[in-house]
């Protein structure tokens, strides 16, 4: 009888150990997903990085999230290498420098790791097969049309004065933003309705390395000084608009104008993109004309859906396979829609929806 009890006790313990090992193995078996985002020093990327990470964790994935310091492209490549070696099944990469990944992703391809480019296209590799983004040409188009409308360019008979900014040359999106905006503005520049007093009209001369607001502020300060821009009614040259590709650059431009004595009553029309809190505050104050709201929920939800489809070997839903050529392949792309936000609708988009507390706008 004692022997039976001992054997029974041993059997129960064995079952318990087996059960624990079984469930531990299930936990270990959770697929690992890697996220590499540009920087934690810009509001957009910090918030979206953790939002996407949390969504993927809710789906049961083991998630590694890295930020590339202060837009450090070499650091980001090393981070991706670590995630490849750690056994990630899917990599979601928002590239700082789209041309820097061709070598490291060869290893990902050997290990059959799926790669999704997130809003910044990875260039010159067939290892990054999927792309989730907003319609970036449409972003630039909307910025150009906003300036066209606010300056009444279709109907005016007087010259209007503008300066042009764009993003970082190592970001493929910069080209789409620029092409979209300039498709609207170039005809007015060519017929003399719009005047770029500085003469800086090429993509290269208008680029802002790393999308850095300090670089944008210093360039705008230099333009204000060299071209003699002053608030309307003061002695000096008038400036009516500044094309800015995103909120970070736009905020730097605003600071330059404020330092030069401009206020919400006489600051030129300035465009933006990303719907950052500071940008919405500036719209509220009358310092920024508009921003393009790229709803992170839409973009992140699409990445989660695409990740699930890749992990489960299902057909991946896309809506474009013609627009984005990365130099090696046409990307399988899902393009999400954007929302133009200005003084007329910023409360509806940001406050009424609960994204921003109205108390934080003052």
Image (cartoon, rainbow, N blue to C red):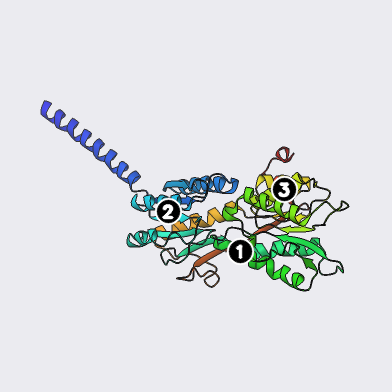
**Disc 1 to disc 3, C-alpha distance:** 21 Å
Mark number for residue 78? none
Q: Would you name the residue on which mark 1 appears? A: 204
Query: In which image quadrant can residue 161 be found?
Result: bottom right
Figure quadrant of the N terminus = top left
| Image coords of residue 69 (percent x, y) | 49, 45
Residue 115 position within the rendered picture, expressed as x and y whole percent measured from the top left: 43, 59
Label 2 residue SS: helix
- Marks 2 and 1, how far apart in space? 25 Å
- Considering the numbered disc 1 on the image, is that residue within a helix, a strand or a loop? helix
- Do tag 2 and tag 1 residues touch (Cβ < 8 Å)? no
Nearer to us of marks 2 and 3 is 3
Picture coordinates of residue 246, whole percent (x, y): 65, 55
Query: How far apart are the alpha carbons under marks 2 and 3?
Result: 34 Å
Residue bearing the label numbered 3: 256
Sequence-earlier tag: 1 or 3: 1
Callouts 1 and 3 close, C-beta under 8 Å: no
Dot 2 or dot 1, earlier in sequence: 2
Q: Please provide percent x and percent y for residue 305.
A: 49, 57
Q: Residue furthest top?
A: 2
Residue 135 showing in the rendered view: no
Query: Is residue 117 found left or right of 338 in the rendered image?
Result: left
Residue at left 70%, top 63%? 142
Q: Which residue is denoted by mark 2 in the rendering?
A: 77
């Amino acid at each position: 009888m004692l022997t039976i009890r001992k054997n029974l006790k041993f059997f129960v313990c064995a079952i318990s150990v087996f059960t624990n090992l079984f469930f531990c193995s299930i936990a270990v078996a959770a697929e690992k997903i890697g996220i590499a985002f540009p920087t934690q020093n810009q509001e957009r990327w910090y918030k979206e990085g953790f939002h996407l990470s949390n969504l993927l964790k809710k789906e049961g994935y083991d998630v590694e999230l890295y930020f590339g310091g202060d837009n450090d492209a070499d650091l980001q490549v090393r981070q991706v290498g670590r995630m490849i070696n750690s056994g990630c099944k899917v990599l979601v990469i928002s590239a700082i420098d789209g041309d820097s990944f061709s070598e490291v992703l060869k290893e990902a391809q050997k290990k059959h790791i799926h790669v999704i480019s997130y809003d910044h296209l990875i260039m010159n590799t067939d290892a990054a097969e999927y792309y989730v983004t907003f319609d970036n040409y449409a972003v630039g188009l909307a910025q150009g049309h906003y300036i066209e409308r606010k300056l009444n360019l279709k109907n005016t008979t007087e010259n209007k004065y503008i300066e042009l900014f764009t993003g970082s040359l190592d970001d493929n999106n910069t080209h789409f933003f620029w092409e979209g905006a300039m498709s609207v503005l170039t005809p007015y520049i060519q017929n003399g309705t719009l005047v770029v007093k500085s003469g800086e009209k090429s993509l290269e001369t208008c680029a802002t390395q790393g999308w850095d607001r300090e670089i944008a502020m210093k360039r705008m300060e230099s333009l204000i000084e060299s071209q003699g821009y002053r608030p309307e009614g003061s002695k000096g040259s008038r400036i009516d608009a500044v094309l800015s590709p995103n909120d970070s650059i736009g905020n730097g431009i605003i600071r330059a104008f404020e330092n030069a004595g401009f206020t919400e009553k006489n600051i030129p029309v300035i465009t933006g993109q990303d719907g950052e809190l500071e940008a919405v505050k500036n719209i509220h104050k009358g310092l920024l004309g508009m921003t393009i709201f790229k709803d992170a929920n839409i973009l992140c939800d699409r990445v989660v859906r695409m990740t699930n489809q890749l992990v489960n070997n299902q057909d991946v839903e896309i809506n474009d396979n013609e627009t984005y050529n990365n130099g090696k392949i046409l990307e399988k792309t899902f393009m999400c829609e954007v929302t133009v936000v200005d003084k007329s609708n910023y409360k509806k988009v940001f406050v009424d929806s609960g994204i921003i507390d109205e108390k934080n706008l003052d």
